[in-house]
Amino acid sequence: MRQLRQRELEIASRYLFLSMAITVIMQDHKHFKEGDFKIKEPYLDLLGKMELTAREERKILRTQMNRQKLQVIESGRNDSFTSFLFLAHGYEEKRNYFNPAIRKKVEGILIELMKKSLQPHQLEEPKSVSSELQG
């Protein structure tokens, strides 16, 4: 029987998958920094903006979860599924997620963060290459 309200589940799930996305961003940042790339800075900058955006959202979600006394805890894992325990107002609800579905969800969040980080108001006006070359 389902004990969590829909909104509680949405908040806790978003927090969970956003936390996973932050982990992926941090790993990718490390790979780009240590990797054999010719020009690293644009990628590192994008990953940094994505991480900042994700952390800001996660902080808001954490505040909402604390206010509503929500918790989400990983309770098990195997080759196919990962289990999480959602705790709310004295109730527990165990949910199993198919690992490829988790990956797809995190990928969607990464794309969303990438789009937010590349919004036009955050981009600098491109300089003319010819004017830079001419001095």
Image (tube, rainbow, N blue to C red):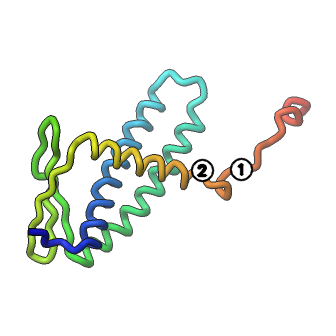
Q: Quadrant of residue 13?
A: bottom left
Q: Is residue 94 above or below residue 8?
A: above
Disc ID at residue 124 = 1
> On the picture, is 52 further left or further right than 41?
left
First in sequence: mark 2 vs mark 1:
2
Instruction: Report the residue at 15% width, 51% height from top.
Output: 96
Q: Nearer the viewer, mark 2 or mark 1?
A: 2
Residue ID at (26%, 71%): 6
Q: Which amino acid is tagged 2?
A: Leu
Task: Check disc 2 and report its element: helix, strand or loop.
Answer: loop
Question: Separation of disc 2 and disc 1 at Cα?
Answer: 10 Å
Q: Classify 97 as above or below 80.
A: below
Q: Quadrant of the N terminus?
A: bottom left
Q: Residue at x 50, y 47 (%)?
A: 48
Residue 76 placement, left or right of 17: left
Q: Amino acid at mark 1?
A: Glu
Residue 55 picture location, percent across and down: 41, 58
Residue at x 18%, y 71% (from the top left corner): 4
Q: Position of residue 40 (x, y in %)?
A: 56, 31
Label for residue 30? Answer: none
Quadrant the C terminus occupies:
top right
Q: Position of residue 53 (x, y in %)?
A: 47, 57
Residue found at the far right of this picture: 134
Query: Is disc 2 surrounded by few (<14), some (14 to 19) or many (20+) residues within 10 Å?
Result: few
Residue 33 locus on image (x, y percent): 47, 32
Query: Which residue matches tag 2?
Result: 118
Q: Residue furthest top?
A: 36
Disc 1 on helix, strand or loop? Answer: loop
